[in-house]
Amino acid sequence: TTSMLPPKRLRGQPSGADVYIALQPPGCNALACFLFWLGGANFTSTPTPVLRNWSIGATSGPILRYTFAAGRTPGSYVWLGAFTTPGTLSVIGSLAQAPLTLRP
């Protein structure tokens, strides 16, 4: 099981955002191989927000908890999270990252 804290937002930025959460699998160095989380055990290779026009507020805990199914390819993964201006891929603030390694 892994968890990730929310991306940082700078003052003066919009209060609403699309929320993207993606998994970068081992050996992936291009956006084309990222897996965008849709909630539950559902992923897509198409950049898709998990939440649209979400109200950004103070959050003190993790925004994601995910348990990998048995049989997932071992290696180094990175969860990535970002707020974007609604309807665009323009990132607000900075990306959140949570690296992890799955062992056989």
Image (tube, helix red, strand yellow):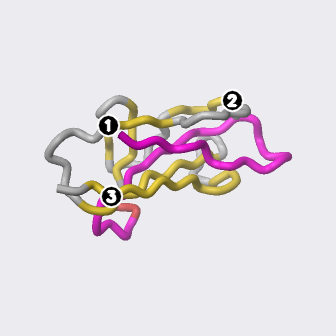
Q: Secondary structure under badge 1?
A: loop
Dot 2: within a 10 Å radius of its alpha carbon, few (fewer than 14), some, or many (20 or more) residues?
Answer: few
Q: Is residue 8 left or right of residue 67?
A: right
- Residue that carries the numbered disc 1 in the rendered image: 67
> Which segment is the magenta one?
1-30
Query: In the displayed structure, would residue 50 be above or below residue 92?
Result: above
The disc at residue 101 is 3
In the image, residue 13 lies in the stretch drawn in magenta: yes
The residue under label 2 is which amino acid type?
Answer: Ser
Q: Quadrant of the N terminus?
A: top left
Looking at marks 1 and 2 on the same chain, the residue that comes earlier in the sequence is marked by: 2
Q: Nearer the viewer, mark 2 or mark 3?
A: 3
- Residue that carries the numbered disc 2 in the rendered image: 55
Q: Are marks 2 and 3 in contact (CB under 8 Å)?
A: no
Q: Determine the CA span between mark 1 and mark 2.
A: 26 Å
Name the residue rendered at 73%, 33% in the picture: 58
Q: Image quarter for residue 87?
A: top right
